[in-house]
Image (cartoon, rainbow, N blue to C red):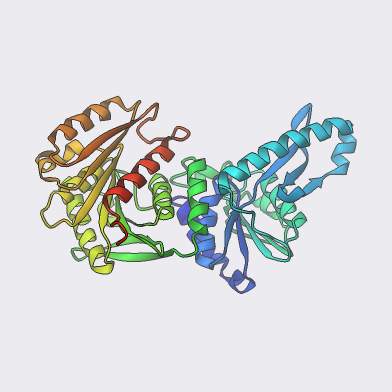
Amino acid sequence: MLFTDRTDAGRQLAEALRHLERRDPVVLGLPRGGVPVAYEVARALGAPLDVIVVRKLGVPYRPELGFGAIGEGGARVISDEIVRHAGVREKDLEAVERAEEAELLRRAQTYREGRPRLPLEGRTVVVVDDGVATGATARAACQVVRAQGASHVVLAVPVASPDVAARLREDVDEVVCLSTPHFFSAVGEWYRDFSQTSDEEVVSLLARASTGTATAEEVEVDAGGVPLAGDLVLPGDAGAVVVFAHGSGSSRLSPRNRAVAGVLNRAGLGTLLFDLLTPGEEVYRANVFDIGLLAGRLADTTAWLRHRVSLPVGSFGASTGAAAALRAAAATDSGVGAVVSRGGRPDLAGADLSGVRAPTLLVVGGADTTVIDLNRQAQAALHCENRLEIVPGATHLFEEPGALDRVAELARDWFTTHLVRPAG
């Protein structure tokens, strides 16, 4: 079984976990890659989502040999047999534990942004990862969850080595695994997109899941008679909605766009991420760069959204999606109140740039020199309020630590300033 990405894997895994809905479970994702999978499971089951942060304890002179694991709340699992056979002194083991505990607390605080850890005492707990190769981390996580008081522990993964999956059944009450291929060498080979999950995405997904007043639903957008899959999130106090136009080779499941969307949701902005093309259209590469087609789809989607919600609408475009967003915004009846471009190609909007009236923010990575020049050329053609922001040291995909955070902050501030109506 081959998964499109972690979101796809999470949705399929959720279906196999439906029998747990009546048990009122808590879903815990192993950071970082397990959290996007866990997010989809928690959303489908209507369950709270948290991270399970564990640190394996390695023998000082053989760190690859684990003698135990620690978790939050003082949870501690130690193998006395390994400690005895390794002949390690107690003070050395204590030093290892102190160092790992400091890192554990740092990571937990980073991911939760000050929110308390979900209590597990007496609960059914589903531990989720994006796959299992050796099983060491998954085993440690399940042992820590048990030590934290969980009454029923379920390990849920999309794919795992068959031998490891069998061994893990000894540590938990239930293992749910969608695929155990015989020829297994690495988790990533069972995903089409196994790009690294960033800390920023983990933080965003956890924050998004904790926003209890937000409604999230899968929708079918009517783009001029063409049905397109979309994900609509509306915080209870939404002041505006932002439509995302993804770039070439991407989709509504783009982890970078989803990370930005999470920040916007926390700021009280609704978001709509949708596929600009149907699966059949994506087969033809030329469609991905047909700015006219993409702009038309975005315009139709914006009109569909404006009939659905009575809120100001903005556009967030990445790569070629930025050109589509600007071309769509240039129409006199576009209804677009503000535009943000991330690593975009606004130059591809051509002559339509002069017709854009919506305030426009162009965000480019400082190391993306070619695209910086193209954005400066496009900026010169704009006749609306506009600004060019360069994120120092960032490359085209903003994969550097903190780079995507900066993009999200800039987008949030731009949309709240130019879209949200002042109270009263």
Is 76 in front, or is 38? 76
Is 65 in front, or is 185? 65
Instruction: Please report the residue visible at 67 percent of the width from the left and 53 percent of the height from the top.
Output: 165
Report the side of 215 relative to 322 (left or right).
right
Rendered location of residue 260, percent (x, y): 40, 47
Q: Is residue 124 visible?
A: yes
Rendered location of residue 310, percent (x, y): 26, 66
Report the side of 147 relative to 261 (left or right).
right
On screen, residue 375 above or below 34: above
Report the side of 325 relative to 395 (left or right).
left
Instruction: Please report the residue visible at 48 percent of the width from the left and 33 percent of the height from the top.
Output: 401
Rendered location of residue 38, percent (x, y): 55, 56
Is 416 in front, or is 32? 416
On screen, residue 250 above or below 177: above
Instruction: Please report the residue visible at 21 percent of the width from the left and 54 percent of the height from the top.
Output: 336
- In the rendered view of the protein, which quadrant contains the C terminus? bottom left
Rendered location of residue 405, percent (x, y): 43, 40
